[in-house]
Image (tube, rainbow, N blue to C red):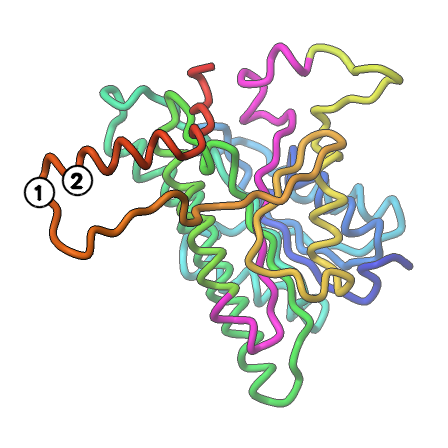
Amino acid sequence: MTGICAGRVAVVTGAGRGLGRAHALALAAEGAKVVVNDLGVGLDGAAEADGPAQRVVDEIADLGGEAVAHGGDIATTDGAASLIATALEAFGRLDTLVNNAGFLRDRMLVNLDEDDWDAVMRVHLKGHFLPLKHAAAHWRAEAKDGRTPRARVVNTSSGAGLLGSVGQGNYSAAKAGIIGLTLVAAAEMGRYGVQINAIAPAARTRMTEHTFAETMAAPGEGGFDAMAPENVSPLVVWLGSAASTGVTGRVFEAEGGRITVMEGWRPGPTTDKGARWSPAEAGGAALGLLAAAEAPQPVYGTR
């Protein structure tokens, strides 16, 4: 197959449904050979009877592409290692990693159990870290052997990670952590030919069907379905291709036909006394700085 990913091998986690499935199909359509990872669990992480990964593999094959399924738990060392090994054994190389897997256990903070916190952190944050770690180790070894890759990683954050979301303290914290991980990994791995970016997508999936219940009701003007997960995938494909050379350590918001480069924490108004403040002085200075600063964006669920 031809396309901007021709000759590349891509791994997509959580690719049995929703955004992951859309990414896998889009990568295959642009010529990539794809490892489709999905554990086959429900929204709360409980196991389901059927595994969706093979169905996506079959879809790709029906369209003339090449893909293999991986059903391991990428939030474990063995599962993440076997994910990378599957790409190397099936296709002989690895070029692109799309970390997408996740689920929800939403609660207001005072009702949020420790198990709900740990489960979401494990799948979202640890489930990004471990595949990235094993892929990065492979690419570093390749570079040290004189085969510097043109490797790409696309991590999946969220508007909740950028702004927070009422009732999603665990999810928001995990998605914010993914942004921090992305920035560090991009800085560390650039010398080995690895570019690492993150997206904050908004689309209709099992995870967001209640969040976007009003906006997903019907396609907009011209029949354009702004909440279709397929709208996010073109950016993921480009970031996962060699065409994105020079783009790393960035966060993009993607929704419908809109792409936004997100600009994170940077210094705003500042003042320096040149000596220690008293508490009252520090408070007065802080209030003055806040008056000169831009107002923060509202947390989701407070608008």
Q: Nearer the viewer, residue 128 or 275?
A: 275
Task: Specify the amino acid type for callout 1.
Answer: Ser
Instruction: Identify the residue at image location x=57%, y=64%.
Output: 84
> Callout 1: few (<14), some (14-19), or many (20+) C-alpha neighbours within 10 Å?
few
How far across and how far down the image is residue 169, in percent? Answer: 34, 30
Q: Can you tell which quarter of the image residue 202 is in?
A: top right
- Asked if the magenta segment contains residue 156, the reply would be no
Q: Nearer the viewer, residue 288 or 250?
A: 288
Name the residue at the left extreme.
278
Q: Can you tell which quarter of the image residue 301 is in?
A: top left
Residue under label 1, please give it: 278
Picture layout, residue 190 above or below residue 174? below
Instruction: Identify the residue at image location x=43%, y=46%.
Output: 265
- Label for residue 282? 2
In this picture, residue 49 sits left or right of residue 109: right
The reply to whether dot 1 and dot 2 touch (C-beta < 8 Å) is yes
How far across and how far down the image is residue 141, in percent? Answer: 54, 82
Does dot 2 land on a helix, a strand or a loop?
A: helix
Range of magenta residues: 187-216
How far across and how far down the image is residue 172, in percent? Answer: 40, 34
Instruction: Identify the residue at image location x=23%, y=38%.
Output: 285
Separation of residues labelled 1 and 2 (CA atoms): 6 Å
How far across and how far down the image is residue 126, in percent? Answer: 40, 51
Instruction: Identify the residue at image location x=75%, y=34%.
Output: 231
Task: Specify the amino acid type for callout 2.
Answer: Ala
